Image: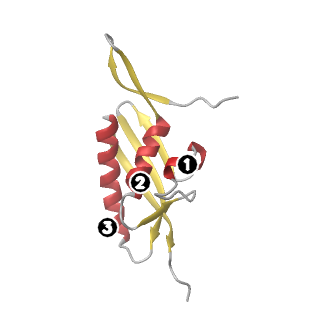
Amino acid sequence: MAQEIETVVTEENVEIGTIKIAEEVVAMIAAYATLEVEGIASISGNITADNVSEATFRKLSKGVKVAVEGDSVKVSLEVIMKAGFNIPGTSSQVQTRVKNAISNMTGLNATDINIRIAGIAGASES
């Protein structure tokens, strides 16, 4: 049985039709924006800038969760940082980039962008 994809009505024009955006598309936008930030190695589920376009929604959902209510969206991200980067500063950049990307591409307002640092890549063991 095929899994039904959740869709969100973002704009309705009765004369022309309705625009619907799948929640997985919003999650993909958040993933792309996150991986553009210097200091982010990957998103949990081993999703990197090199393979994000090939990631299945099931794999993507390990590190990116979205909840859409009306025209607001809440995003939870689980990321692996690169060693040597400032965690609060990098996380703030991710929040800004994700908020702007979702707003620009969908018209939705990202009200919450929560980040969990799940690990550090490239940290040498002593």
At 43% from the left and 36% from the top, the residue drawn is 68
Question: Foreground residue, 111 or 27?
Answer: 27
Instruction: Tell me the quarter of the image containing the C terminus.
Output: bottom right
Q: Nearer the viewer, mark 1 or mark 2?
A: 1
Residue at the (39%, 40%) spot, across then down: 73
Choose the circle earlier in sequence order: 3 or 1.
1
> Along the horizontal axis of the image, is 31 left or right of 3?
left
Residue underneath mark 1 = 55
Q: Position of residue 37 (x, y in %)?
A: 36, 61
Q: Using the image as rendered, state which of residue 53 and residue 40 is in the foreground.
A: 53
Determine whether the residue tagged by mark 3 lies in a helix, strand or loop.
helix
Q: Nearer the viewer, residue 117 or 29?
A: 29
- Rendered view: 13 above or below 46: above
- Please name the residue that numbered disc 3 is placed on: 89
Q: Residues within 10 Å of mark 2 (few under 14, many from 20)?
A: some
Which labelled disc corresponds to residue 2? none
User: Residue 117, relative to residue 84: is it above or below?
Assistant: above
For the residue carrying disc 1, how many other residues have a C-alpha within 10 Å: few (<14), some (14-19), or many (20+)?
A: some
Residue designated by label 2: 114
